[in-house]
Image (cartoon, rainbow, N blue to C red):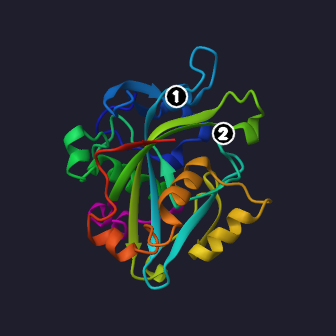
Amino acid sequence: EIMAGTTWDGNAMSQSDMMEKDTVIVLDDADNVIGSESKRGSHEFIAKQPRGVLHRAFSVFIFDQSTGELLLQKRASTKITFPNVWTNTCCSHPLHGMSPNEVDRPQDVEDGSVVGAKNAAVRKLEHELGIPKKEVPVEGFKFLTRLHYWAADTVTHGPESPWGEHEIDYVLFFTVESKDQLTVEPHPDEVDDVCWVTKQKLLAMFDDKSLLFSPWFRIIAHRWMLSKDGWWDDLAATMTTHRHCDYATIHEF
């Protein structure tokens, strides 16, 4: 387990290193922290844990306010879970033992601050997409809600897939005035491609059977983002009001 204060350096670790060394936050169904597990251990779908181990995650969506576009990434072909899929800007896990702290308490969810998840988001945006921390300050993120889902990676690993996700996922939005203000230099071990899309472009991509998408991104997009007057159409209010915030519910999928 990484000790508090130890510097986490994703560039110094392989995918296998992160699978063994990253210590995810294990949860009960009510999002209470009940322990820790390696990234590998939590993502193994095996007989003794057919849905892996429930752990905490975050999903970041970065938008260009001037165009309304969303930044997507295509997960690298070398990723162990869900390679080659298009997904939202960044999706990963808060970890135990990080400095600054990444473990949120129930009161952090109740007041919508979730600084732990936001700290993790800043760390991983830099690691995966090369976005400097100063360009995505913690106070710029908007926490919207949580979802609980599980999904085996059957596309990559077949119907008996030994890998998958089982997460309570914190949805975080972030906006920049213009994409020109954002430095994006993807890490080749993490990301194969990026693109900025309008809502209409994303709908067309979803209809393209040649493209793969992460299950969590499809859930979030279809449940909350793509409907008329959803989070995307109503982006200004989504970012500046509590109209679309639901901190009490853990949405089950």
The residue that label 2 is drawn on is: 80
Question: Dot 1: within a 10 Å radius of its alpha carbon, few (fewer than 14), some, or many (20 or more) residues?
Answer: many
Q: Which mark is residue 42?
A: 1
Residue at (52% x, 28% y) in the render: 42
* Residue 44 point in image, percent of width and height: 60, 26
Q: Secondary structure at mark 1?
A: helix
Q: Which part of the image, by quadrant, shows the N terminus?
A: top left
The kind of residue tagged 1 is Ser
- Whether residue 174 is visible here, answered yes or no, is yes
Res 73 quadrant in image: bottom right
For the residue pair 147 and 155, the one nearer the viewer reads as 147
- Please state which of residues 39 and 248 is positioned toward the viewer in this rendering: 248
Residue 141 falls inside the magenta stretch: yes
Q: Residue at x 46, y 30 (%)?
A: 54
Q: How far from the left and from the top, in percent, is residue 182?
A: 45, 75
Q: Quadrant of residue 33?
A: top left
Mark 2, mark 1: which one is toward the viewer?
Answer: 1
Label 2: few (<14), some (14–19) or many (≥20) C-alpha neighbours in 10 Å: some
Percent of width and height locating residue 86: 65, 58
Q: Which residues are magenta?
A: 129-142
Give the answer, above or below, for where 6 lies relative to 219.
above
Mark 1 or mark 2, which is nearer the start of the sequence? 1
What is the C-alpha distance between the residues marked 2 and 1? 13 Å
Type of residue at label 2? Answer: Ile
Q: 138 or 6: which is nearer to us? A: 138
> Can you see residue 185?
no
Relative to 250, residue 221 above or below = below
| Residue drawn at 52 percent across, 61 percent down | 89
